[in-house]
């Protein structure tokens, strides 16, 4: 029997999806690509392969999981398997620079960004040239969950930070991004969720406690245990509180929703959480595309959609079930 294969490297993110799949009787199995061995001369199993590889996999000791996944997706594609969030989606997941190019091509605004691949001296020089006196944001090109995103009030504050920054904070692909700090009326961002390329709902995220924006409950636990600091004022409390997620009753405006859906269709992305911030004029600027998106159960519970087809996992399960049914009809 064909089934859904969930490609991942972090089983802690699976329970909400497993519950939604099991609720509708969707046959599925996990394919953990934190490591693996594959006979490329053999054909992969029949089924739908849902790629949830994360840009932050290296922070969990899985440095080459994304590279392994790229190879597996090529193998699956060569054999004609349906891959949800295929190679093009993975390419965007692991590079914000490529995300930004695709977003701008789709007519969406992004914050002004400067890419730097060099030592700290080059990073500081670029900051002085493009962002002095500040404020400015520093982020890795390949991060995930908001990890490593820091805001500095001035170039001097950035320079002081870099002088004592631990080596493990360096971006895994060697590329730093310097970015404009977008002033908003309130310290919030919006995350719009999509399944099957269609808008599901949007959540407003309170960033007062920092840029660690993964909605999954386990992410907040991980950050507290690690003592990471991602505070938007440059210094975090010893144990930062988890950001607050609230499902927006009215969603987002139709023109923006349509542009985001068009972007996903053009980029080969089926499932995503797209984050944007509104400037003082209320105009949205998109700064992150998460193709391994997670959902916040507390926010869904408060909105009265938890455990339903209108929840994130519920909408995803319905989409994958339809894909599986289509595949089975083709094979009949």
Image (tube, rainbow, N blue to C red):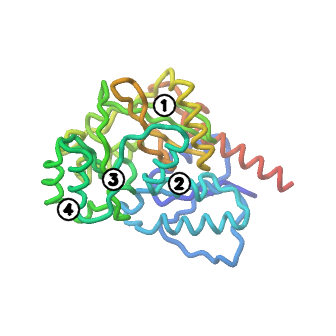
Which residue is under mark 1?
Answer: 202
User: In terms of secondary structure, where does tag 1 sit?
Assistant: strand
Dot placed on the residue nearer the N-terminal end, 1 or 2: 2
User: In terms of secondary structure, where does tag 4 sit?
Assistant: helix
- Residues at circles 1 and 2 in contact by the CB criterion of under 8 Å: no
Tell me which residue sits at (20%, 62%) in the image: 121
**In front: mark 1 or mark 3?**
3
- Residue 203 in percent (x, y) is at 44, 31
Which residue is under mark 2?
Answer: 52
Tell me which residue sits at (49%, 41%) in the image: 273
- Tell me the distance, in whole angstroms, between the alpha carbons under discs 2 and 4: 36 Å
In the rendered structure, the answer to whether residue 36 lies left or right of residue 74 reads left
Tell me which residue sits at (28%, 62%) in the image: 170
**In front: mark 4 or mark 3?**
4
Which residue is under mark 4?
Answer: 121
- Is residue 242 at least partly visible in the picture? yes
Label 1: how many Cα within 10 Å (few below 14, some 14–19, many 20+): many
- Tell me the distance, in whole angstroms, between the alpha carbons under discs 2 and 3: 24 Å
- Residues at circles 2 and 4 in contact by the CB criterion of under 8 Å: no
- Is residue 236 at least partly visible in the picture? no
- Residue 242 in percent (x, y) is at 31, 39
Res 236 → quadrant: top left
- Tell me the distance, in whole angstroms, between the alpha carbons under discs 1 and 2: 20 Å
- Tell me the distance, in whole angstroms, between the alpha carbons under discs 4 and 3: 14 Å
Given residues 314 and 90, the one toward you in this image is 90
- Residue 258 in percent (x, y) is at 59, 31
Given residues 268 and 305, the one toward you in this image is 268
Res 86 → quadrant: bottom right
Residue 218 is marked as none
**In front: mark 2 or mark 3?**
3
Dot placed on the residue nearer the N-terminal end, 2 or 3: 2
Which residue is under mark 3?
Answer: 177
């Amino acid at each position: 029997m064909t089934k859904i294969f969930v490609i991942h490297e972090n089983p802690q993110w699976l329970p909400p999806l497993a519950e939604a799949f099991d609720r509708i009787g969707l046959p599925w199995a996990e394919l953990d690509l934190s490591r693996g061995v594959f006979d490329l001369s053999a054909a992969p199993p029949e089924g739908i392969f849902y790629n949830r590889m994360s840009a932050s996999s290296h922070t969990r000791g899985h440095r080459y999981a994304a590279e392994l996944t790229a190879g597996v997706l090529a193998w699956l594609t060569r054999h004609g398997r349906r891959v949800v969030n295929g190679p093009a989606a993975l390419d965007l997941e692991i590079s914000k620079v490529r995300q930004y190019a695709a977003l701008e091509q789709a007519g969406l605004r992004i914050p002004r960004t400067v890419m730097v691949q060099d030592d700290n001296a080059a990073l500081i020089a670029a900051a002085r040239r493009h962002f002095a006196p500040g404020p400015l944001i520093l982020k890795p090109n390949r991060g995930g969950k908001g990890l490593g995103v820091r805001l500095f009030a001035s170039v001097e504050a950035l320079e002081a930070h870099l002088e004592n920054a631990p080596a493990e904070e360096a971006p895994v692909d060697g590329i730093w991004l310097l970015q404009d700090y977008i002033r908003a009326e309130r310290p919030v961002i919006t995350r719009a969720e999509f399944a099957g390329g269609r808008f599901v709902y949007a959540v407003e995220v309170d960033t007062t406690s920092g840029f660690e924006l993964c909605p999954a409950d386990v992410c907040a636990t991980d950050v507290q245990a690690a003592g990471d600091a991602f505070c938007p004022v440059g210094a975090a409390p010893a144990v930062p509180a988890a950001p607050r997620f609230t499902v927006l009753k009215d969603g987002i405006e139709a023109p923006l929703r349509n542009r985001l859906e068009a972007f996903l269709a053009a980029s080969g992305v089926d499932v995503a959480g797209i984050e944007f911030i509104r400037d003082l004029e209320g105009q949205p600027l998109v700064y992150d595309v998460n193709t391994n998106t997670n959902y916040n159960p507390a926010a869904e519970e408060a909105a009265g959609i938890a455990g339903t087809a209108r929840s994130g996992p519920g909408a995803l399960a319905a989409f994958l079930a339809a894909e599986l049914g289509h595949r089975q009809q083709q094979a009949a």
